[in-house]
Structure formats: C-alpha cells, structure tokens
Amino acid sequence: MFCPTFRSLSIALAVPVLALGACSPDNLATAGDSSRPASITPMGDPSLPAPAVEALGPVCAPADPAQIAQMEERLNAERTALGRSPLKFKENLGFAAQAHACDMATMGRATVAGSNGSSVVNRVRAVEYTACSSAQVVGRGSDAYSQMNNWMAHEPDEEVLVHQKFDDAGVGVVNMGGRLWWSVVLADRCH
C-alpha cells in the first residue's frame, strides 16, 4: 500500500545485461547461407553501472490546495470541452507529481527527467500505481490558468493532457524563486 508520509521512496530497477560468456574466437557461428564463420560478440556493457535504485526526487512543503484545485478544475474543463472524460485525481499520483515539481524547482529547470535520472514511469511505479501507460507535462510560470493556456497552445502537451486513454492524474506545484513549478502526471490503470 502506498504511504505518502515517506520522504524517500525507492524502487530497484534491474538493468538487463546480456552476457554471452561462452563466446570466444573458438565459438563461431555460421552466417546465414554462407559457410563462412561469423564471430559472436558479447553484448554485455561493462561500463554500465550495476542495477540502479531509482528514487523520487526531494519533497518540498505540501502544495497549496487552492492552486492544485484550480489546475484540476482547468484540466477537466479542457477535457470535457473537447468531449473527453474527466480525470480522477489520485493521491499517489499527486505525490509523484509534487515530488517532481520540487525536484525541478531544486534543479532550476523544467524537465521530465528527474535529478536522479528517473522518468515518469519510474515515479509512477515508485508510488505503487500499476499503469499500462503514463505521461507527464511540466511547466514553470504563473497561475494554473496561465499554465494551462501555455500547455493547450503547445500541441504535444495538449495531446497528452486530453488523451482519452488516461483515467487518473496527479498535480504538483511548488512556489520557489518567485515562480510556480508545475507537474502533472497522467496514467491509466491496466484493466
């Protein structure tokens, strides 16, 4: 069960490495119809780190509930205006969004990549949401209305925000440096 009181939540991700230890110059395969031998090169990359632990970014103070409510209202208003179903806002996805908003504010840049190299997929898994697909939009600016207008004017962001496959979402916002750092995580449950 997801517990939003955890300040640092992590999951272990396995880094697949294919090791072909039996391959050597003496172990050759035939290439297609040719009778010429083809060498088999091991695919393991020794320069890759060992399996990494992906964690959510830092968690700042809780988001302003009024700002979150405004963004949720604007998001569902845009979706229903376009004939899409409204999203259900989930606490665990909100926690992932809030942690990432804080991470962006701490880094000083709006990006979907976490400071620890995590992606939205890692963050959704870290809050124990079983998603078939997930996406994220981020922004740095002012109030919910202005930020939503910016996203809706940018076709890739608009497509993510109003895509019918997403059922659930979470919103995060951090006020740092006189700017609001926004993060919206969208996902759909595997049914």
Image: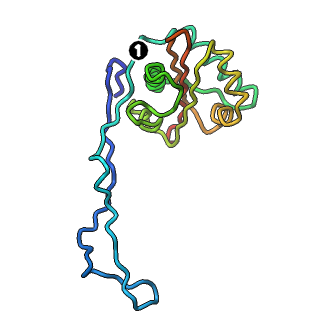
Q: Where does the image place residue 128, in percent across and percent down from the top left? A: 39, 33
Q: Residue at x 38, y 85 (%)?
A: 30
Quadrant in the rendering for residue 143: top right
- Front residue of 38/64: it is 38
How many numbered discs?
1
Q: Quadrant of the N terminus?
A: top left
Q: Look at mark 1 in the image and give the residue it sits on.
A: 60
- Front residue of 107/165: it is 107
Q: Where does the image place residue 101, in percent across and percent down from the top left? A: 48, 21
Residue lying at the far bottom in this picture: please name it.
Answer: 35
Q: Secondary structure at mark 1?
A: loop
Quadrant in the rendering for residue 141: top right
Left or right of 26 in this view: 54: right
Left or right of 185 in this view: 7: left
- Front residue of 31/16: it is 31
Instruction: Decide: is 32 above or below 84.
Output: below
Q: Where does the image place residue 179, in percent across and percent down from the top left? A: 56, 13
Q: Where does the image place residue 5, in percent across and percent down from the top left? A: 33, 17
- Front residue of 104/8: it is 104
Residue type of the residue flagged with mark 1: Cys
Instruction: Decide: is 116 above or below 107.
Output: below
Q: Residue at x 48, y 39 (%)?
A: 131
